[in-house]
Image (cartoon, helix red, strand yellow):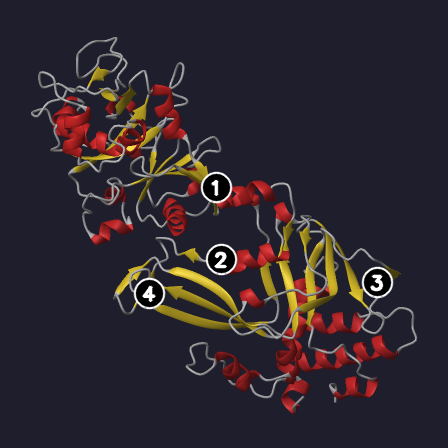
Amino acid sequence: MDKAGSSSVAGELTKTYASFINDVWNSNATTINPQGIRRVLTKVNEIYGGNRQNDSQEAINLILDSLHEALKHTSLEYSPTASVDPWHNYLKHNHSVVAELFHGMYRSSLYCPLCKNASHMYDPFSILGLPVPSRKNFVTAFCIPYGLHKRPLQIAVNIERQETVGDLRARVEQVTKTSNFLVSTSASHVKRLLNRMQRLTCVEAKDQLVLYEVNPALPKAAEESLTYDSMITDNNAGLEESVVMVPLVSEAYGEGRECASVRMLFLKKEMTTVDIYHEVLAYVKDYILKVDSIIVEKDLSIEELVRNLCPSIDGGWNSKYFSLNIINNNKAVCPFCGRSACQNCRLPYSNTTTLKSLLAKMGATSNRYLFEATVKREKVFELELEWSENIRKDALSFMTNYKKHRTVKILCISSNSNYSLYDCLDQFVREDILDVNNKWYCDICKKHVQAKKAMTIYKAPPILVIALKRFQDSLDKLIEFPVRGLDMSRYMEEKCKGGYNLFAVSNHRGSIDTGHYTTTTQNAKSGKWYYFDDEKVCRTESIMSRYAYVLFYRRQDVGVPTRDSDKIMQASQ
């Protein structure tokens, strides 16, 4: 230590700590009381002076920081935006034996989704804090493609309930590579559509999230609207105001609509009902081509399909596959036929009747009512897809036949298994999307964007201290961790010099506010493990525990400590 470091509180703690380590290695006493360290810690932070339980991770971090401050060679400020190698820049201004052994460095990155511009920040750490995954954060949802060319996909997304619907969309888009979705809260009918700004706390436990792909052939209103910055643009899915979202409900098995397959059409208001029939034909044509062996090899346009499959008779719709009905959501009087007991009107096949005129009969101009917290169903325009009796069962089976994404399979497997330390590391480096209220300014695009953010370990230290961020729902959750050969290579920027071996564990049993700490430690000379519970010490083979809180790893190329008392005491002089 230099003169300034020696006279500081950190210097006093360093001297006391060195004396304590000397006693640990050389004293013949059966127990050693660390009250001297606690007395000096109280000078640094008075919370260590009472009888209240303190966090072992915070105490370890405080000791390491104090040792580092007392032993470092300079007090120059570290600049995280330095253009030189960030780790060497850090050591240049913060060199100490503690930094060499215990300090590592994070790299946090932001990536613009438009131009791929990247921004990197580097921050040192002495303890690597890892989140403990929670299955409560997994949301399963169905992704419905626009058309029957692909099967619906069930996907599991790891997301906090405080995040937004926009965050959910961004996560799903990363997996499906589909860039525009509309979110509903029910698989059996369109119960409600969710705005991008809404928190997922608005979704009830019984709700089944469904993401409908927006028709990719339709023009978007403007680039700004695709960011879903306001409820107005989101209420039309980022599309032109001339486009209306229309639920397409297939008839259900048995009574009611609980088993119905629901799709979402995106129709222009000026479309005639003839156009609507043709749009639905285009939507379902892949199924029709599958079941009709006569035309299965032909690549027909919609006009050719209409002439071959649905020849007009007296100007009406004539199809052996399906017909369309207008669903009567008004239980009093049907706005289309005027009857009080209407069981859904047949949609006319007309070149003069437009979607706009049908909406006008309901006193509406769009289906924005679907975005309201309490949907006025009598104001919602919906179509029923009524399959012909001979193919009805097969068609419904085809439409509802979904596949499970690997995330769902992994979630099902992991539901009956424990998490591992690698799961915690995966969670730590998981890429994410900034929410709409926390955009990043891209200096290339000259605009605020929802950037992708990523965290990696730029440099891992020789002695790696890992703290598991346990909270109320994970205090006693078993996290399996390797005793030998922890592989950090896939989480690091630089090439890893080797695996890590465990040499100590700080255990915590109890609640967030109260509890008891114990330690499991390996003897550096014999390689045997011991369990420390205050003054009680015993041999143990039980290293892994659901109470493990702080893990201490030594890189395999780093030798075990063999210092004698003279070398230890040099640090205090």
Mark 3 — residue? 530
Which marked residue is nearer to the observer: mark 4 or mark 1?
4
Q: Earlier in the sequence, mark 1 or mark 3?
A: 1
Task: Residue under label 4, please give it.
Answer: 116
Q: Nearer the viewer, residue 510 or 386?
A: 386
In the rendered image, which residue does mark 2 sit on? 430
Quadrant where the N terminus lies? bottom right
Residue 17 found in image quarter: bottom right
Query: Which amino acid type is marked by label 2?
Result: Arg
Query: Where residue 313 sits in the image (x, y, percent)?
Result: 11, 17
Q: Is residue 53 left or right of residue 230?
A: right
Q: Which residue is mark 1?
A: 139
| Secondary element type, mark 3 | strand
Q: Earlier in the sequence, mark 4 or mark 1?
A: 4
Secondary structure of residue under mark 2? loop
Q: Is residue 389 left or right of residue 500?
A: left
Give coordinates of residue 149: x percent, y percent.
32, 38
* Nearest to N terminus: mark 2 or mark 3: 2
Compute the Cα span from label 2 to label 3.
35 Å
Q: How far, Cα to Cα, is label 1 from label 3?
A: 42 Å
Q: Amino acid at mark 4?
A: Lys
Question: Helix, strand, or loop for circle 1?
Answer: strand
Q: Nearer the viewer, mark 2 or mark 3?
A: 2
